[in-house]
Image (spheres, grey):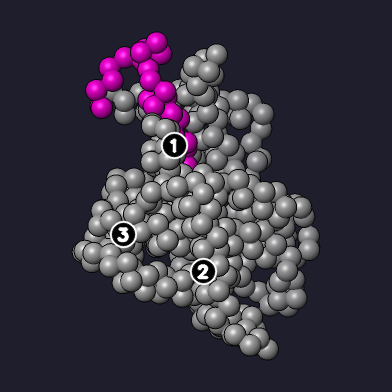
Amino acid sequence: MIYALLNIAMLAAPPVFAWMIHNYLRHGDLSGRRKAVFLGVYIVLMNVILFAASWLRGVKTLDFNQMTVTYRLKWIGLGIVLGFVLPFFVCLLTEEQITLGGFRRYILRFTSDIRRYFPYAMQSARADLESEVSGSYLNWLWWLIEPVCMMLIYAVIFGVIFSASEPYFTVFIFIGLTMWGFFSRNVSASVDIVRGSRDIITRIYMPKFVLLLSKMLVNGFKALVSFCVVICMMIVYRVPVTARMLWAIPVLAVLFLFTFGVGTIMMHYGVYVSDLGYITGIVLQMLSYFTGTFYSLANRIPAPFGEILEQFNPVAFLIAAFRNAMLYGKSPAIPILLLWTFVSVVLVALGAFTVYSNENAYVKVI
């Protein structure tokens, strides 16, 4: 029964996901007939591409009886990732409303807006940081106290009670908490950020994703403070210094892009679904246990599921890549890092496209 469900998921999940992205790019205004046609197109096209990829890697036949669970899961994971990309090309070929010129105009507008409004985002972030610590006795030390306390709690729970054996475990935990905290805080904040900024967006115009960018700069500064603690802890634990530590920079850049892309999309739906914040909080809490925040997925979850989950969960992959670079002198899997970089750029493009297409309606809704 499980294998039958996996077989169905292999053939159906990637095409359906690509079809949903196509419908999303068309703002859901496709007729029922065109939806059915495109679903058929994606079923054929997606499975042909995935089989071609398998054939190039040496799998010459599609024999379900000989397939391992690992093969099935990798097929589904690769198909979902491909589903982010393929609809752009199909839309360019089949939809008159979507053109290369339109993409180019959106890109130019987005880059221009980032340059124009980035100083405002910086000033807003600085004001938020100052307001957080104004009137408190410990000031910016609060940005250290919370992650350090959480690190100690989880270090005791997972390191002592559950006997975690990862080298430099205290630093290991702190890195996971810092990176997951950056992602989860920004995604959680993005849901209500437009509603919470009603006084601003009803008086002046600015691209609404600038509000999210400002919040990400706030949380990014706090994460930077935590990473300073990470460096101090690495010195205490005498972690060997290697050139591969430089991989931490592109890993953090991809995390920032991925978070921004997810945040802009969640920001849009948060305008229309008032209780989306509750759902997002529950989902993020569940996902925190599948990202390796407190342990290594590849080592703790039986093979091959742990390794697959670590590769196809972008935040889990980035956390593991950062730890490997900083603590263990290992380079990340470059093809997978490039893959998630590309997906992050696509998510940013989808998010910016969504905001630009709907931002005039936000004022009316809130």
Which quadrant would the N terminus be assigned to in this image?
top right
Question: Can you say whether 130 is above or below 251 in the image?
Answer: below
Left or right: 266 in relation to 237 = right
Instruction: Report the disc number at residue 148.
Output: 2
Do callouts 2 and 1 mark residues in contact (Cβ within 8 Å)? no
Indicate which disc, 1 or 3, sits on the residue closer to the N terminus: 1
Left or right: 336 in relation to 118 = left
**Nearer to me, 56 or 136:** 136
Question: Can you say whether 363 is above or below 266 in the image?
Answer: below
Sort mark 2 into few (<14), some (14-19) or many (20+) by Cα contacts within 10 Å. some
Check the image and name the residue furthest to the front. Answer: 160
Sort mark 1 into few (<14), some (14-19) or many (20+) by Cα contacts within 10 Å. some
- Magenta span covers which residues? 56-85
Indicate which disc, 2 or 1, sits on the residue closer to the N terminus: 2
**Point 42% across, 73% down: residue:** 229
| Callout 2 secondary element | helix
Question: Can you say whether 115 is above or below 93 in the image?
Answer: below
Question: Can you say whether 65 is above or below 238 in the image?
Answer: above
At label 2, the amino acid type is Val
Q: Is residue 187 magenta?
A: no
The residue where tag 3 is placed is: 327
Do callouts 1 and 3 mark residues in contact (Cβ within 8 Å)? no
The residue where tag 1 is placed is: 301
